[in-house]
Amino acid sequence: MTTPLETAFADVEDADIAKIPGRMVIVADDTGALGPLARKVDRLTKGAVSRLTTSAAFGKAKTGSAHVLAYPAGLAAESLLVLKLPKKATPAEARVAGAAIAGFNGAVPLHVLAGPLATAPELALGLGLRTYAFATYRKVEEDAPKPNGQVTFHVKDPAASEAAFAPYAAQIAGVFFTRDLVSEPANVLTTTEFAERLTELRELGVEVEVLEEKELEDLEMRTLLAVGQGSESPSKVVVMQWKGGGEEAPLALVGKGVVFDSGGISIKPSAGMEEMTMDMGGAGVVAGVIKTLALRGAKANVVGLVGLVENMPDGKATRPGDVVKSKKGDTVEIINTDAEGRLVLADVLWYAQERFKPAGIVDLATLTGAIIIALGHEKAGVFSNDDAFAGAFLAAAGNEGEGAWRMPLAPAYDKALTSRIADIANVGGRPAGAVTAAQFLQRFIEPGTPWAHLDIAGVAYVNKDTDLSPKGATGWGVRALDRLIRDRYEH
């Protein structure tokens, strides 16, 4: 597992700034004005900092940008980074500025002179998230310098900063867990390996059950089993319960966990198929949220359920035109075996409601390419049967800076899912493909149960860096759902 940067908070009064080793970070506001600590550093460097902050280049630089002074005179530090950040920076601005520090981290100690800066925990969050690197399979040269694994924030009130950062540290660990899962190749992260990694959450107080194929057959999860029957990897459902609340009904999180999606008999084009190792992104987010809740001891009841399957072509694989009966009892004509995620979710959604009677249910899935056409890689699609529930999630996502956009649902779209021989078809054609996929899932939601479907196909894995993550797996949704739970479900 990728280890997050170790973050410590120390009293700035105890620091001998001139003798701090390694790399140092200070803050200047958007006008170039320096606070007391930055002014002290400016004096030690004989005005080098003020020369930078009063320059035209600094004036034109964006909020959150970073500017490096190498081997500054008067300091033991080998380099000094000056962050441009307003005195009353928003949490989002502070996180982006913190992320800018990540590129400054090297193989020597890292120190941030934050002083009385109220957003120091937000800086630490941004820094922590952006330092992620999945390097499990990269060869490391023997003489290569070891990356620095710790940062010290020198602040006015270390205890207060540490307390404020604690839930963020849990988020970082949860996001890293998700990113690691999504980044793993499919020959390593099989359904069995995935389930084993989730059972390790028991060490944090999570109750974890693994339902094997025989149990899934007994539970009549036929649409889920239909997806995986062409694979050598056994299909599984993993149930993770975090019981931090009272006797109230839990929030249920349901994730699509297709560890590799070839498309099945409706096989995908070869170009880009290697990225289908990320088709378990929804299950990865659910796992990351549960880990976050456990690490911070959330006072809420949350159950995470993930359907783990592999979609492969084989003599035993489901064929286009097959009809399968769902756990709910509805029959599904499988027109396209590459529309498999909704078949996995249908049975797990119904099982979650039957067993747990949840107060609300959120499913996450890298479900459709259509949502990428609609929203690109900036926002996830949010579909919901409940305006208040959708609004609460959208507010949480907005507060955490995770892009999300409400998409429509309407009975008129159901017509596209009409089957010639079964109760419903699993696809509705190219028009409104993300919407008809959501309409399919809504069929498996009990009336009166608040539900949101998050289509994360465009945001779970990206091919360029974002503000808070390198290219690849993003962990989108862990922080938004953690915020939703804090705002709406905790005591």
Image (cartoon, rainbow, N blue to C red):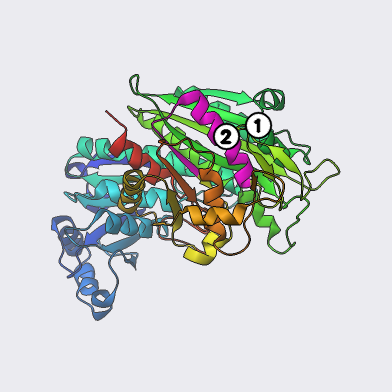
Rendered location of residue 388, percent (x, y): 31, 45
Q: Earlier in the sequence, mark 2 or mark 1?
A: 1
Tell me the residue that label 1 is attached to: 221
The residue segment tinted magenta is 341-363
- Left or right of 14: which side holds 188? right
- Left or right of 329: which side holds 9? left
The disc at residue 348 is 2
- Left or right of 19: which side holds 336? right
Residue 364 part of the magenta-drawn span: no
Q: Secondary structure at mark 1?
A: loop
**Residue at coordinates 25% horizontally, 49% vertically from top-left?**
120
Assign the C terminus to one quadrant of the image.
Answer: top left
Q: CA distance from mark 2 to mark 1?
A: 8 Å
How crowded pointer 2 is (Cα within 10 Å; few <14, some 14-19, many 20+) is rated as: many
> Is the residue 373 above or below the residue 483 in the image?
below
Is there a contact, CB below 8 Å, between mark 2 and mark 1? yes
Rendered location of residue 209, percent (x, y): 57, 23
